[in-house]
Amino acid sequence: MRVPAWGGRTRKDVCGRFTLTRDPITLALRLRAVNVRQEPFRPRYNIAPGQPVNAIVQAPGGERRLGRLVWGLVPHWARGPEAFNG
């Protein structure tokens, strides 16, 4: 196994899961986003591809705001989100 320059280990099996433990207001303040709706928040520790998540998105005018997106990768050649299992 090759060791990268940063000292970590290279893995071939990446599942694409992550956690989201910061509330939307804290994220918005840290990332300078505006127009954040106050909504109930619960930390999530196993977000998988295909699940909705809060994310900071940048509008065409440059304004950052909190948006709801679906986490995952859909390659340009896939017929839809269900067609890719990478």
Image (cartoon, rainbow, N blue to C red):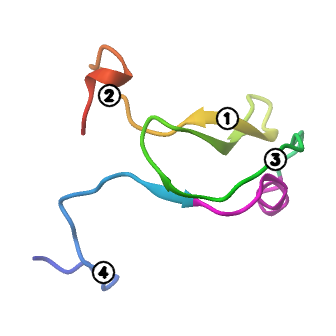
Q: CA distance from mark 4 to mark 2?
A: 28 Å
N-terminal label among 3 and 4: 4
Q: Is residue 13 above or below residue 10?
A: above
| Disc marking residue 8 | 4
Query: Circle 1 — which element?
Result: strand
Residues in magenta?
A: 20-32
Q: Is residue 57 above or below residue 14?
A: above
Front position in the image: 62 or 50? 50
Q: CA distance from mark 3 to mark 4?
A: 36 Å
Residue at label 2? 75
Residue at label 1? 68
Question: Which amino acid lies under the numbered mark 4 shown in the image of this protein?
Answer: Gly
Residue at label 3? 40
For disc 2, the neighbor class at 10 Å (few under 14, some 14 to 19, many from 20) is few
N-terminal label among 4 and 2: 4
Placement of the C terminus among the 4 image quadrants: top left
